[in-house]
Image: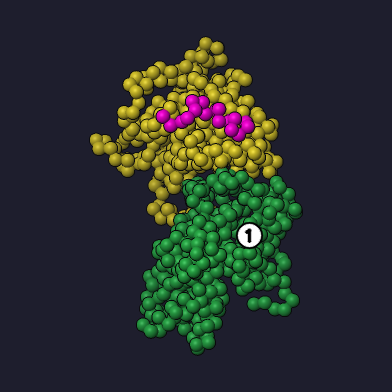
Chain colours: A yellow, B green
Amino acid sequence: MTPTREEQHWMYRNMVTSRRFEETIAGIYFEGKTPVFNMANGPIPGEMHLSDGQEPVAVGVCAHLNSDDVVTATHRPHHQAIAKGVDLDKMAAEIFGKKTGLSGGRGGHMHIFDADVNFACSGIIAQGMGPAVGAALSRKMQNKPGVAVAFVGEGAVNQGGWHEAMNLAAVWNLPFVCVIEDNAWGISVSKEASTAVTNNADRAAAYGIPGKRIEGNDPFAIYDAAGEAISRARAGEGPTLLEIETYRLAGHFMGDAEGYRPEGEKDALFEKDPIPKMRAKMLADRVATEAELDAIEAESAARVEAAIKFARESEEPAPEDALTAVFA
Amino acid sequence: MNKPNERKLTIARAMAEAMQQEMQIDPSVFVMGEDIGALGGVYGNTRGLLDEFGAERVRDTPISETAFIGAAVGAAQDGMRPVVELMFVDFFGVCFDAIYNLMAKNIYFSGGNFKVPMVLMTSTGGGYSDAGQHSQCVYGTFAHLPGMKVVAPSNAYDAKGLMTAAMRDDSPVVYMYHKSLQGMGWLGTEAGATVHVPEESYTVEIGKAKVVREGSDVTIVSLGMGVHNALKAAAKLEAQGVSAEVVDLVSLVPLDRETIRASVAKTGRLIVVDEDYMSYGVSGEIIATVTEHDISVLKAAPKRIAFPDVPIPFSRVMEQHCLPNPDKIVAAWNDIKAA
């Protein structure tokens, strides 16, 4: 299937918003961290995992989801959160650790939770699998609409819990899709060095479900495959496994010198940056004008700027807020 | 506690009845775990549920604790109220990430925007020569990590009321039941755990300890199986003219520190009985609860009887050497008096 004109505009807007958000965060992240890099300093302390280059996965999948559908994401969650419709002001504030953040500053960038759009993420590899499968089970048991999508990295597929959850989703025939973002690197270890199969979608055979690998970090191909998988899930036909080739244009985290990457690899990936490619394709296909795309870019930048302003200007949590919200 | 002709239940039946009654009134409650369907649970605590509610709500799972406990978290966040069973608490080693990094943290990390109303029920305890991967209590391990309520019933009345309270709680509750209290004959059964249980549904407050025997000379604090050892020791001490008060903690999280402190303020002496390992655990926490609050109430140094810091051995004589028992409690009292 092919995204409609409106869907393409939505996809482009969310890719651009996500990229702009990450670039802005990257700029702010080093405030207070130079000349000596100390992760604890600056307005955004802690680890920071940026998603530059991986936007096609988020928009290609989330174009088929609505706010009732459930998404679990990873330690690198911003692009998916944006595509799922997480409140950008509150997400930015959470990343800054502010009182107005989604969780009042208790979670930070690896723990983005927005109940309004059924989005959650977590900082440990493959951890979102169980909760997504459980949400799918919940929908099936309640006979409520909605599917659950777990986004994981290619490194997660070597975790035991990933396999347990895939088996559970399959044996119970749940409305679940696992989307593997294959950015080729588990921190510094290549997929080739860590993974016995080149195509993780082959692992679907172990669970008797369809599996498909999508090459090229192509939002249109991702949209097509995800649409089929999510339609299957909505129709009660069970889970699907997708592995999507994508590009990690940033380091594993901010401050990663990336000495482990072969020379020239990143330059080659930037040559294939999906955002200018999508822009060019939309123009060539005449689904958007230069002016429309310029407007989307300007609006996205303004949206990000407003969110960052909100985050910066928000008050810090009271220190003793740390002692609340342990229990419901 | 029991009157003639009153209905008595085992803890196993009390747990099952609590689930049955809650499932009848709340369609969001369901049960999943290994062998909880047709078998009715290895410890009998889900017997009858499959027949009444069917395999959709009484789900046998694959042997995949990480997946199904993680799934319970996701289902709980999505409006269900799962009760999941970890067959032996010793198995937490294969799935603790789902328990303490997801179940216990998602309320906090969501700033309270997600609720995680789930019960993790799990068997504890030894005494029947099952060795050190099937006999542990690890109460302290669970109670140490924030974000989970932890309860441990010593009798069927509390077992039913705590289970009902746990299923109605919007936070995760770890429900730790002791195998020797279940009323399963083949595990050896402590008769004192089988008590009168009302037919109707009721709750026992989580976070509230109980004085199960009043006394004036010494306070014996324990939980689960240890409460029965404490009561037997108290009877022996009574024969010596010593009046022992027994506090059943009922819950470890929240811990009812007030009841402990009030009892020790009255008696001036404290013995803690815990089947979990000695060091860094419940026994030390109970003593600290008293001493950091007001050390002047103590007329003697507190004593603790807990499992020594060794893996649980298989051999009957070795395991029994390590386990708490009434005689060790009496000996602790004698030490206190001799000091």
Q: Quadrant of residue A71?
A: top right
| Quadrant in which the N terminus of chain B appears | bottom right
- Closer to the camera, A14 or B162? B162
Q: Residue at x 49, y 69 (%)?
A: B317
Q: Is residue A241 left or right of residue B323?
A: right
Q: Chain of mark 1?
A: B
Q: Is residue B154 left or right of residue A278?
A: right
Residue B273 visible in the current orientation: yes
Q: Residue at x 57, y 40 (%)?
A: A165
Say which amino acid is labelled 1.
Answer: Tyr
Say if the magenta span includes residue B298: no
Q: Secondary structure at mark 1?
A: loop
Residue B73 visible in the current orientation: no
A185 vs B204: above or below: above
Judging by the rendered image, the residue that carries numbered circle 1 is B43
B309 vs A137: above or below: below
Magenta span covers which residues? A193-209
Q: Quadrant of residue A314?
A: top left
Q: Residue at x 48, y 41 (%)?
A: A122
Q: Residue at x 56, y 33 (%)?
A: A178
Say if the magenta span includes residue A204: yes
Q: Is residue A64 left or right of residue A110?
A: right
User: Could you tell me residue B275's position as x and y percent?
Assistant: 49, 66
| Quadrant in which the C terminus of chain B appears | bottom left
Q: Residue furthest left?
A: A35
User: Could you tell me residue B6's position as x and y percent?
Assistant: 72, 74
